Amino acid sequence: MKSIIELIEDKRDAREHTAEDIERLVSAYVGSQMPDYQMAAWLMAAFLNGLSSAETAWLTRSMAGSGRMVDLSSVPGIILDKHSTGGVGDKTTLVLAPLVASCGVPVAKMSGRGLGHTGGTLDKLESIPGFCVTLAYDALLRQLLDVGVVVTAQSADVDPADKKMYALRDVTGTVQSIPLIVGSIISKKVAGGADAIVLDVKVGSGAFMKTEAQARALAHELQRVGELLGKKVVCVMTDMSQPLGRAVGNSLEVCEAIRTLKGEGPRDLTELCLALGAKMLVLGEAAQDERIGRQLLLDSIAEGRALATFRAWVSAQGGDPRVADDPSLLPVAGFATVVTAPRGGFVTGFDAEGVGRSAMLLGAGRQTKDAGIDLGAGLVLEAKIGDAIDAEAPLATLYASDPELFDAAREKLLASVEIGDGPAEEPVLFHEV
Ligand code: URA
């Protein structure tokens, strides 16, 4: 058997590992026989020299098997999961999970927290007073049977390899590697127990993958490895050249998600949820095709079933379901200010990552993994790409608990919005399926 040093040297010199080599690396790391500095060296070698298709699949399988595999087989039906590679203002899960469940397809999802400029579903959910994101296994199963939707934090014993490796990648400049992202995402999905997954690969200035070619390569690998490991997978590439919807920040995004469940949400968010939801209903065999699926979703919104499922879900996880009818129960930062357009014209583009960083400066995101977060802080855009805007007209409203945070956030936001003379086309939401 090769030593850990020999395995690092193999990858440094771009030699291919065997399945046993990779299993040894993962189990040694999870079992603490391989210190962080050795895994960091291997991750950088893998980042620089890449992993073959076979190595990526072996890595994913070893990571998924590094802890407990959640068994949802006692829940009838095809259980769906959905994952986005991360973006700015992406509150899709808050809408999709209850919406799809309200049409009879159970949704079980393990979510993460925000890091850097991208927000995390768990933080958004925790802005609902009382909402608890940690559930014991039997409570999770009961809720999936009774309510049809459960969104939790990944428990410590599920995919511990990803937890340790992701934290290390985050501080060693090794996040943006396709094989490592595939291992991280698919291993979590395999360990999480759902039967079928819709993967939303974000493309553009607010995404990890900035170009269409990178996003396409990631999407193909996610689908290939997911299917190889026994999951039904649909992968879509969607726009992240501007924030999704208008709200960026935890409770502000919950508020926008609730409006979307009532049929009053922003167009791009609503369209994305209907399109992804229709695919989920087809995968879950609740609709014969996407056209029928879309109609089922629209009916559920119009008849109030989507919102009723949201209330039931929030209540089951200890949250106050009255937020669905009274958004003033959500936390809002105590100070607000309006940022106005420096000139008239048309909004022609965003640096979406910059908008996310502006929300972070207001307190809505973390600079480090353990930093605190202001659940009521963030911003709401008053204009998006294609909109005409007058000089001095509102561009965004900023919310913070400390007015001293406004100057830096305003500056960041203004640097992230392009205003031009001619009208710009709205970005295409779906790049590829
Ligand atoms: N999201 C994940 O879960 N893992 C990655 O590596 C990148 C994005």
Image (tube, rainbow, N blue to C red):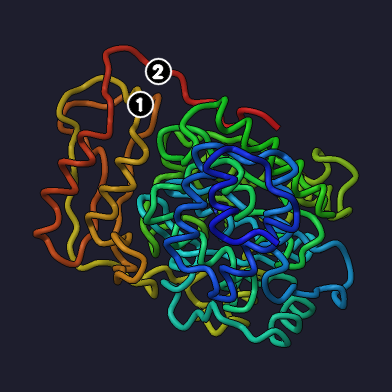
Mark 1 sits on what residue?
A: 349
Question: Relative to 242, is 161 on the left or the right?
Answer: right
**Picture quadrant where residue 54 is located:** top right
For numbered disc 1, what is the local secondary structure?
strand
Which of label 1 and label 2 is nearer to you?
1
- Marking on residue 113: none
Q: Say if 278 sits above or below 2 in the image.
A: above
State yes or no: discs 1 and 2 in contact (Cβ < 8 Å). Answer: yes
Q: What residue do we see at 31% from left, 63% from top?
A: 368
- Marking on residue 424: 2
Q: What residue do we see at 51% from left, 67% from top?
A: 164
For numbered disc 2, what is the local secondary structure?
loop
Q: Is mark 1 within 8 Å of ligand 1?
A: no
Q: What residue do we see at 70% from left, 62% from top?
A: 1
Q: Nearer the viewer, residue 212 or 245?
A: 212
Q: Position of residue 58 (x, y in %)?
A: 73, 52
Identify the image quadrant of the C terminus.
Answer: top right
